[in-house]
Amino acid sequence: MKPTIRLGKIAGLQIGVHYTLLLAVALITWTLAEGFFPDAFPGWSRVAYWLTSVVAALLLFVSVLVHEMAHSLVARSRGLPVEGITLFLFGGISSLSAESRSAGEEFVVAVVGPLSSLVLAVLFGAAYLASSGNNSPVTAVLAYLALVNGMLGLFNLLPGFPLDGGRVLRAAIWGATHNLYKATRVASTIGQAVAFAFIAWGVFQVLTGDVLGGLWIAFIGWFLNGAAESSRQETSVQEALRGVRVAEVMDHHPETTSPSMGVDVLVREFFLHHGKRALPVEEVGQLVGIVTITDAKEVPPDRWPFTRVSQIMTTSPLYSVTPDSTVAEALRSLAERRLNQLLVMSNGSIVGMISRENIIQYLQLMSDYGVWKKPGILQRLGQ
Ligand SMILES: [Zn+2]
């Protein structure tokens, strides 16, 4: 998930906010101001309820941030690259750009999030008890934060992937069987069961009168189901690609173009006639850039005859893999950088290109030969 707004860095972690977070803050503020606080702490003015609710909703997301920072900081201390944290509608996501390398590592990184939420619950609970007996907004906010952090900790400990509890479960199965794929399959299947339970519970709530609360729960279930399903599919692809090298899948004879070529010729000859989506640009045998359909599209067609490849090509960074890299690594690199193709370089010269289409074709062939049966994901990979 890409953040809509970047808030800055805390402890070297890039903190961002997705626009859906605003919706969550608004919804939570509303339910607190019109329900929770007036019920539990009667007698304040309407303005006091709303102001307290805004503060409480914002502090809830600060609590979520603490939870995510616990994941990220522990991951980083173990040498895993961490990109940052994005807060969104349902809480937070830590962008860890690499998966854990061992079951023990996965376990620690996963469990520390819910633990930090539970610690916050205890701290806020203690502060609430110390101040209880008075009906002030501060007491009310402490009570709410104790409650909501407790719920957050327990919810995340549910044993379904992709929740933290699911990761803990996956780490346990992984440790016991030494098979990450099997562990992911089991944990995401349980994750889907948890998700369906949420949807069923949400529907039940709606039917018994709590429309907003029920929809919210069902929506969380729907989100969890999608996340569990995609991690299962990803595992299936990784399993199919296990041990396959870039050299086996890549285009061995990529056509190249020159910086001085006109964009009109590029589009007609290479993109339209040869069905290429991207070409390396070479000048006297040296790679100088890469040019794609997207680059050409940024120039109005009537300007194509007057524009040269050198004016639209990307010169840096030029991402590449080696022929010996695994296809799984190439796919990860494509996904992370939202690219469609990578150069394949060996000893400083181009030996091929690998694109999403190459990988999809390979998986399609595996599927056609009955080696692998998950064609459903092919469409998603192509995006
Ligand atoms: Zn977590």
Image: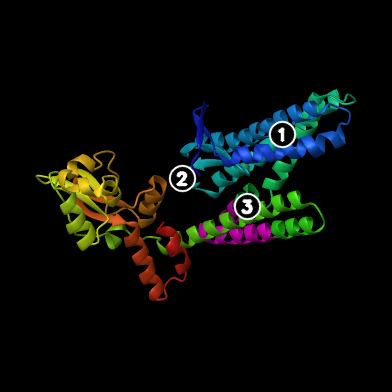
Q: Is residue 377 visible in the rendered structure shown here?
A: yes
**Which residue does the image show at 74% across and 31% down from the upper left?**
53
Q: Find the residue positioned furthest to the left.
A: 284
Tell me residue 162's x, y (percent). 59, 51
Whichever of callouts 3 and 2 sits on the residue coming sooner in the sequence is 2
Residue highlighted by disc 1: 119
Disc assigned to residue 98: 2
Q: Secondary structure at mark 2?
A: loop
Q: In x, y percent, where is residue 320? A: 28, 47
Which residue is painted at 69% across and 51% down in the image?
158
Task: Please tell me in which quadrant of the rendered image residue 65 appears.
Answer: top right
Q: Is residue 309 left or right of residue 219?
A: left
Quadrant containing ligand 1:
top right
Which badge, 2 or 1, is on the more N-terminal residue? 2
- Which range is magenta? 169-196
Tell me if residue 178 comes above or below residue 26 in the rendering: below
Asked whether 173 falls inside the magenta stretch, the response is yes
Rendered location of residue 333, percent (x, y): 38, 48
Amino acid type at image mark 1: Val
Q: Amino acid at mark 3?
A: Gly
Using the image, tell me which numbered label, if any, was put on residue 166. 3
